Image: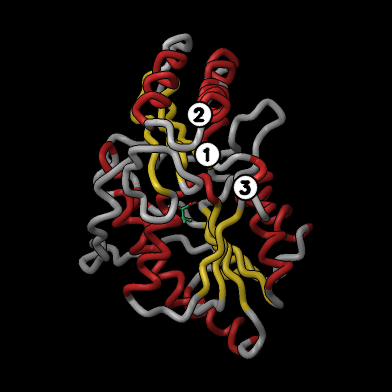
Amino acid sequence: MNISQTPEQTRALIAPLRGQRIALVPTMGCLHAGHISLIRKAKSLADVVIVSIYVNPLQFGENEDFNQYPRTFEKDADICKNEGVDIIFHPENLYPDNGAKVTLKVSDLSNILCGISRPSHFDGVVTVVNMLFNIIQPNIAIFGEKDWQQLAIIRRMVSDLHMPIEIIGSEIIRETDGLAMSSRNRYLSPSERQQSLALSQVMHLMKNNSQQGEKTSETIKYGIENLNNYNISLDYLEIRNELTLKPEHSITPESRIFIAVKVGKTRLIDNISLKMESEITS
Ligand code: PAF
C-alpha cells in the first residue's frame, strides 16, 4: 500500500494504473465499520482502490467541530492495509494558503434538511469532492447512504458538470443496537450514547406505524410525540422522496424518513426507507 501526501505524488502513483478500473472512497478518516464496508464495496467493483483521508475545513461551519474532529491516521492506515487498499491519499492541506477563492456552489438540494442549519456545508463538500475527482480521476466513487443528502448532491454535481464518474451509494452500517455508525459517535458520553438510540428507534416506530397512502404529516406527528420521550433536541424529522428529496405528502415506496438531532453538543443524522420489506428487491 502506498501513502501519498500531495496531488502530484498521487497522480504519479496512479499513472501506471490507468486503464484499470479505479475506485475512490473519500473519507475524513477515523475509519469505522461503515467505512470498511465502503472499502469492501469498492474492492468488489474495481481493480484499484484509493482511500482519501482529509478533514476538509471548508465543510465545517464557524462553530462546528473542525478542530475537535478525531484524527487517527495510524489506525486508519492499518485498517486500509488490512483491507487491501492500494493507495491512501492523505494531504495536509488542499487549499491555497490564503484560502480558497474558487469554490463550487450548490443550489436547490442544499437549502433543505441539513443545509438549513449548516448553510455552507454542502458547498464545502462538493468543492473538495470535485478536487479529489480532479486529482484522482476515478471511474467510480463510493459514498455512505447515512449522508443521503450529500450523496444526492454529489450525484447532481456529477450529472450537471458532466463528470465521467459513477457514484455508488453504500448502505448504512449500524451498531447492534441500531445507532448508525459515525465518527462523531465517539463524542457521546455513556448517557448520551443511550439517548442517541432515539433516532433509529423512532424511525422504526414510524415505519411500523405507517402504511402506504397514509398522510406523512400523521407519521411525522407520531414520530415527534415519541421523540419527546428522549431528552434530545430535534433539528428536523421529515419524510421526503428519496430520489428527488422533495417533501412527500403521502407515503409511497420512494418515501424516506430523514432525521437530525443534537444529543448534548453532538449532531447526529440518520435516515430509513419507508419501503415495506416485501418491496425491497436488493
Ligand atoms: O462524508 C464525508 O466523510 C465527507 O463529507 C467527504 C465526502 C469525505 C468530503 O469531505
Which residue position is annotated with label 2?
Answer: 210
User: Which image quadrant is residue 15 in?
Assistant: bottom right
Mark 3 residue element: helix
- The kind of residue on which mark 1 rests is Leu
Rendered residue at 33%/64% (across/down): 127
Question: Furthest residue to the front?
Answer: 213
Distance of label 1 from label 3 (alpha carbons) = 10 Å
Q: How many marks?
A: 3
**Crowd around label 1: few <14 · some 14–19 · many ≥20 (10 Å):** many
Mark 1 / mark 3, whichever is N-terminal: 1
Badge 1 vs badge 2, beta-carbon distance below 8 Å: yes
Identify residue for label 1: 274
Residues 75 and 127: in front is 127
From the top left corner, tell me how far across and down residue 154 is, in percent: 41, 62
CA gap between label 1 and label 2 equals 8 Å
Disc 2 crowd rating (10 Å Cα; few below 14, some 14-19, many 20+) is: some
The residue wearing badge 3 is 279
